[in-house]
Image: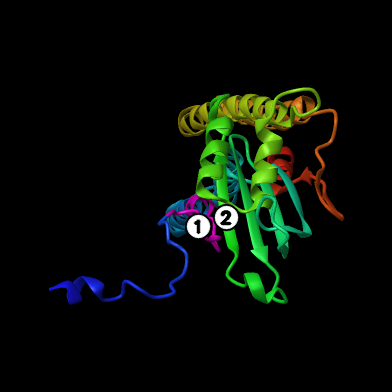
Amino acid sequence: MMGWFDNFRYWEGGPTLYMNDNRTSASTDYAILTIILAFLTVLLAVVTILPGIIKQRITSLCIISLSLLSGLTIFLGKYGSCWNVGQGKIYTSYKVFSKQKINATMGIFIGLQHMNVTLKALPDDDRYMDVNFNEQFIWEKPTDMREQYKLALMKGLPYPILLVAEHFTLNAEYFVWGFYYRSAGYYANIALTAALVSWILMNLMLVNIPRYGAYLMAVTGSLLCFSAGIYVILMPSLPLLIRFEDTIISFHFGWCFYLVLVIG
């Protein structure tokens, strides 16, 4: 009987596997892909039924396409992770107080209410070939980042990811980037929510009273521009720079910001 329990007890196994959705890097942002496919499906359906419209086919197609593009922009702006982006190659410690170094690429993708941090070892680093992380930090409430930072410490995440999270957790002296990014995302998200309401009313009016639908289309565009503008205004005046020994990761506006600004 004891032999049954002795089997597989003494062997040199690997580290414990904790089943977590963020353990490895995702190759595709499925939320964004779902939004795009949903709007493309609606556009395809519209194109299919357009031949049945006797008059003003081109005009109808242009109006519907513009409406769908506006709606797609609103949803991508609300749920996208590329309002502010920082990327670079780093060579730094893999664990805190460790002499072991990792040569990897790091990406920091900031949305309105969350941040994705990716860490992937370069192919020439044989010791850490399996390192491929994609961690998401959400800051819907002021205390969210502090709680998630503690959770990241408990999970034993790599030092580079912890360093990035620390920059958005601290709120003292010059370490106030988390506060500014959270404020900018909060008010920009409110503006996009107002744009979503205006967009829904616009579609209703375009069917019944096209004149008022055109007015609401202008309102929707103005709210999109306002969301991009308020995001810029509330950004920290002191640019965020994250230092990894010989590397400095700086940030720039991403495609979500420019999409909202241009379509607005």
Highlighted range, magenta? 20-35
Q: Determine the secondary structure under disc 2.
A: strand
Residue 27 is inside the magenta segment: yes
Residue sitting nearer the eye, 137 or 91: 91
Q: x, y percentage for residue 33?
A: 51, 56
Q: x, y percentage for residue 126?
A: 67, 76
- Residue drawn 70% across the image and 73% down it: 125
Residue sitting nearer the eye, 48 or 240: 240
Q: Which mark is residue 106?
A: none
**In this orientation, does residue 35 appear?**
yes
Circle 1: residue type: Arg
**Which quadrant holds the C terminus?**
top right
| Residue designated by label 1 | 23
Residue 188 is inside the magenta segment: no
| Residue designated by label 2 | 134
Location of residue 211 with respect to 137 vertically, above or below: above
Q: Determine the secondary structure under disc 1.
A: loop
